[in-house]
Image: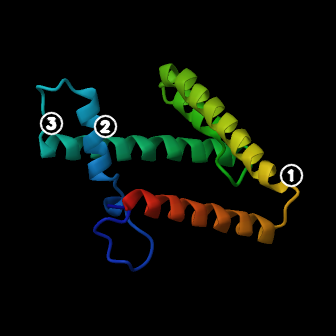
Amino acid sequence: MSDREGHSGAGAPTDDDLSLPKATVAKMIAELLPNDVVCAKETRDLIIECCVEFIHLISSEANEICEQENKKTIAPEHIISALTRLGFTTFAPEVESVLKDHKQQQKDREKKVNKFEQSGLTEEELLAKQEELFAASRAKFKSGQQ
Protein backbone atom coordinates (compact mmCIF):
# COMPACT_ATOMS: atom_id res chain seq x y z
CA MET A 1 0.00 0.00 0.00
CA SER A 2 1.33 3.40 -0.86
CA ASP A 3 0.89 7.00 0.15
CA ARG A 4 -1.72 7.24 -2.58
CA GLU A 5 -3.86 4.42 -1.22
CA GLY A 6 -7.43 4.97 -2.34
CA HIS A 7 -6.42 7.87 -4.58
CA SER A 8 -8.23 8.13 -7.89
CA GLY A 9 -5.04 9.07 -9.75
CA ALA A 10 -6.22 12.50 -10.89
CA GLY A 11 -4.18 15.42 -9.61
CA ALA A 12 -2.26 15.69 -6.36
CA PRO A 13 -3.34 13.53 -3.42
CA THR A 14 -5.46 15.17 -0.74
CA ASP A 15 -4.79 14.86 2.98
CA ASP A 16 -7.36 12.04 3.10
CA ASP A 17 -5.33 10.09 0.51
CA LEU A 18 -2.08 10.20 2.51
CA SER A 19 -1.32 7.20 4.67
CA LEU A 20 1.41 4.83 5.82
CA PRO A 21 1.77 1.19 4.75
CA LYS A 22 -0.57 -0.75 7.01
CA ALA A 23 1.52 -3.94 6.92
CA THR A 24 4.67 -2.06 7.94
CA VAL A 25 2.92 -0.28 10.80
CA ALA A 26 1.34 -3.56 11.94
CA LYS A 27 4.78 -5.19 11.97
CA MET A 28 6.27 -2.33 13.99
CA ILE A 29 3.42 -2.52 16.50
CA ALA A 30 3.78 -6.30 16.81
CA GLU A 31 7.53 -5.95 17.46
CA LEU A 32 6.92 -3.47 20.28
CA LEU A 33 4.10 -5.35 22.04
CA PRO A 34 4.54 -8.39 24.27
CA ASN A 35 3.76 -11.69 22.53
CA ASP A 36 0.50 -12.15 24.43
CA VAL A 37 -0.92 -8.75 23.39
CA VAL A 38 -2.56 -8.09 20.03
CA CYS A 39 -3.55 -4.82 18.40
CA ALA A 40 -7.01 -4.37 16.88
CA LYS A 41 -7.23 -3.13 13.28
CA GLU A 42 -9.08 -0.03 14.46
CA THR A 43 -6.22 0.71 16.86
CA ARG A 44 -3.65 0.24 14.10
CA ASP A 45 -5.63 2.58 11.84
CA LEU A 46 -5.81 5.17 14.62
CA ILE A 47 -2.04 4.94 15.14
CA ILE A 48 -1.54 5.45 11.40
CA GLU A 49 -3.79 8.52 11.46
CA CYS A 50 -1.85 9.92 14.44
CA CYS A 51 1.47 9.30 12.68
CA VAL A 52 0.28 11.01 9.49
CA GLU A 53 -0.99 13.97 11.53
CA PHE A 54 2.33 14.18 13.42
CA ILE A 55 4.29 14.13 10.15
CA HIS A 56 1.99 16.81 8.73
CA LEU A 57 2.45 18.98 11.83
CA ILE A 58 6.25 18.69 11.84
CA SER A 59 6.59 19.21 8.08
CA SER A 60 4.29 22.27 8.17
CA GLU A 61 6.32 23.82 10.97
CA ALA A 62 9.58 22.96 9.20
CA ASN A 63 8.20 24.58 6.04
CA GLU A 64 7.44 27.78 7.97
CA ILE A 65 10.98 27.81 9.37
CA CYS A 66 12.32 27.21 5.88
CA GLU A 67 10.30 30.12 4.48
CA GLN A 68 11.48 32.41 7.30
CA GLU A 69 15.06 31.62 6.28
CA ASN A 70 14.21 32.23 2.62
CA LYS A 71 15.09 28.65 1.74
CA LYS A 72 13.29 26.52 -0.83
CA THR A 73 14.28 23.11 0.51
CA ILE A 74 13.47 21.72 3.94
CA ALA A 75 16.72 20.55 5.50
CA PRO A 76 17.16 18.15 8.44
CA GLU A 77 18.00 21.15 10.63
CA HIS A 78 14.56 22.60 9.86
CA ILE A 79 12.94 19.38 11.12
CA ILE A 80 14.97 19.49 14.33
CA SER A 81 14.05 23.15 14.83
CA ALA A 82 10.38 22.33 14.19
CA LEU A 83 10.47 19.56 16.80
CA THR A 84 11.95 21.97 19.34
CA ARG A 85 9.57 24.79 18.46
CA LEU A 86 6.55 22.47 18.85
CA GLY A 87 7.70 21.22 22.24
CA PHE A 88 9.13 17.86 21.18
CA THR A 89 12.60 18.71 22.50
CA THR A 90 13.08 15.19 23.86
CA PHE A 91 12.92 13.86 20.28
CA ALA A 92 15.71 16.12 18.98
CA PRO A 93 18.73 14.15 20.28
CA GLU A 94 17.43 10.89 18.76
CA VAL A 95 16.70 12.61 15.44
CA GLU A 96 20.19 14.13 15.45
CA SER A 97 21.67 10.68 16.15
CA VAL A 98 19.72 9.11 13.28
CA LEU A 99 20.79 11.96 11.00
CA LYS A 100 24.43 11.39 11.93
CA ASP A 101 24.07 7.65 11.19
CA HIS A 102 22.38 8.41 7.87
CA LYS A 103 25.17 10.77 6.81
CA GLN A 104 27.76 8.11 7.70
CA GLN A 105 25.87 5.51 5.64
CA GLN A 106 25.85 7.92 2.70
CA LYS A 107 29.62 8.40 3.00
CA ASP A 108 30.14 4.62 3.18
CA ARG A 109 27.98 4.15 0.08
CA GLU A 110 30.06 6.74 -1.79
CA LYS A 111 33.22 4.86 -0.81
CA LYS A 112 31.81 1.65 -2.31
CA VAL A 113 31.09 3.45 -5.58
CA ASN A 114 34.63 4.81 -5.61
CA LYS A 115 35.98 1.25 -5.13
CA PHE A 116 34.61 0.29 -8.54
CA GLU A 117 35.87 3.49 -10.11
CA GLN A 118 39.33 2.89 -8.62
CA SER A 119 39.49 -0.74 -9.75
CA GLY A 120 41.18 0.40 -12.94
CA LEU A 121 38.89 -1.81 -15.05
CA THR A 122 36.56 -0.64 -17.75
CA GLU A 123 32.85 -1.35 -17.50
CA GLU A 124 33.23 -4.04 -20.21
CA GLU A 125 36.02 -5.74 -18.24
CA LEU A 126 33.94 -5.66 -15.07
CA LEU A 127 30.96 -7.17 -16.94
CA ALA A 128 33.19 -9.89 -18.38
CA LYS A 129 34.48 -10.74 -14.89
CA GLN A 130 30.91 -10.84 -13.63
CA GLU A 131 29.90 -13.23 -16.43
CA GLU A 132 32.87 -15.47 -15.57
CA LEU A 133 31.77 -15.58 -11.94
CA PHE A 134 28.17 -16.37 -12.95
CA ALA A 135 29.36 -19.18 -15.25
CA ALA A 136 31.55 -20.65 -12.50
CA SER A 137 28.67 -20.43 -10.05
CA ARG A 138 26.28 -22.14 -12.50
CA ALA A 139 28.79 -24.93 -13.13
CA LYS A 140 29.30 -25.45 -9.40
CA PHE A 141 25.54 -25.50 -8.83
CA LYS A 142 24.94 -28.01 -11.64
CA SER A 143 27.71 -30.32 -10.41
CA GLY A 144 26.18 -30.26 -6.92
CA GLN A 145 22.75 -31.30 -8.22
CA GLN A 146 23.98 -34.48 -9.91
Q: Amino acid at mark 3?
A: Cys
Q: Position of residue 122 (x, y in %)?
A: 84, 66
Question: The C terminus lies in which quarter of the figure?
Answer: bottom left
Q: Nearer the viewer, residue 32 or 108?
A: 108
Q: Nearer the viewer, residue 5 or 134?
A: 134
Q: Residue furthest front?
A: 146
Q: Is residue 36 above or below residue 104?
A: above
Q: Which mark is residue 39?
A: 3
Q: How many marks?
A: 3
Q: CA distance from mark 1 to mark 2?
A: 40 Å
Q: Nearer the viewer, residue 138 or 5?
A: 138
Q: Residue at x 62, y 31 (%)?
A: 101
Q: Residue at x 30, y 44 (%)?
A: 25
Q: Is residue 83 above or below residue 118?
A: above
Q: Is residue 58 above or below residue 17?
A: above
Badge 3 element: loop
Badge 2 element: helix
Location of residue 75 by image quarter: top right
Badge 1 element: loop
Is 19 left or right of 73, judged from the image as shown? left
Residue carrying label 1: 118
Q: Position of residue 83 (x, y in %)?
A: 53, 31
Q: Which mark is residue 58?
A: none
Please name the colour scheme applied to the rendered image: rainbow
Q: Which mark is residue 28?
A: 2
Badge 3: how crowded within 10 Å, few (<14), some, or many (20+)? few
**Is there CB contact under 8 Å for labels 1 and 2?**
no
Badge 2: how crowded within 10 Å, few (<14), some, or many (20+)? few
Q: Residue at x 68, y 37 (%)?
A: 103
Badge 1: how crowded within 10 Å, few (<14), some, or many (20+)? few
Is 55 left or right of 109, judged from the image as shown? left
Q: Is residue 7 above or below residue 65?
A: below
